[in-house]
Amino acid sequence: QVQLVESGGGLVQPGGSLTLSCVASGFTFSRFAMRWYRQAPGKERELVARITSAGSSTNYADSVKGRFTISRDNAKNMVYLQMNSLKPEDTAVYYCHADGITGGLGYDYWGQGTQVTVSS
């Protein structure tokens, strides 16, 4: 059974930091690229950050460059999103996403999301 379970969300003041975690199970984590998406109320889901399967390359949305860092630990089946200098506009539900190829077929999986609220 494939699972992606996010944790680490919460309420934080502007300028603060949070680290989101996502633990994966049920698939070969080290073969999948991982992404963090977010969706704010009334807005479309947007890609925040991406990391390749080996962790050798990362990409970020312009809105979070220099503030957020994505990383992964393939030994622990974990992906992280370190978020610094948080702004009210970072408020959203954050989702962990995996995509890759197994047995010649492409798969993608979603977590259930974790709420991040940036407010004073």
Image (spheres, rainbow, N blue to C red):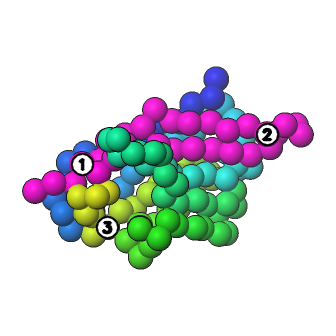
> Horizontal placement of 56 versus 59: left or right?
right
Q: Do residues under tags 1 and 2 come within 8 Å of each other at their CB atoms? A: no
Q: Farthest bottom residue?
A: 66
Mark 1 element type: strand
Near-viewer residue (115 or 56): 115
Give the vertical position of 76 relative to 65 (above or below). Answer: above
Is residue 69 visible from the viewing direction of this image? yes
What element does badge 3 sit on?
Answer: loop
Q: Mark 3 points at which residue?
A: 84
Which residue sits at x=41%, y=67%? 64
Q: Which amino acid does label 1 sit on?
A: Thr
Mark 1 or 2, nearer chain start = 2
Residue at the disc numbered 1: 117
The residue carrying pointer 1 sits among few (fewer than 14), some (14 to 19) or many (20 or more) residues within 10 Å by Cα, namely many
Residue with the mark numbered 2: 106
Q: How far apart are marks 3 and 2 (CA)?
A: 33 Å
Point out the tag, 3 or 2, that comes first from the N-terminus: 3
Q: Which region of the structure is painted magenta?
A: 91-120
Q: Based on the picture, tell me whether residue 109 belongs to the magenta stretch.
A: yes
* Residue at the (49%, 52%) spot, across then down: 46
* Residue type, label 2: Gly
Kind of element beneath mark 2: strand
Question: Is residue 110 located in the magenta-colored stretch of the structure?
Answer: yes
- Relative image position of residue 42 (x, y in whole percent): 35, 41
Locate residue 19 relative to residue 23 in the image: left or right.
Answer: left
Q: Is the magenta stretch mostly helix, strand or loop?
A: strand
Tell me if 42 is positioned left or right of 100 in this view.
Answer: left
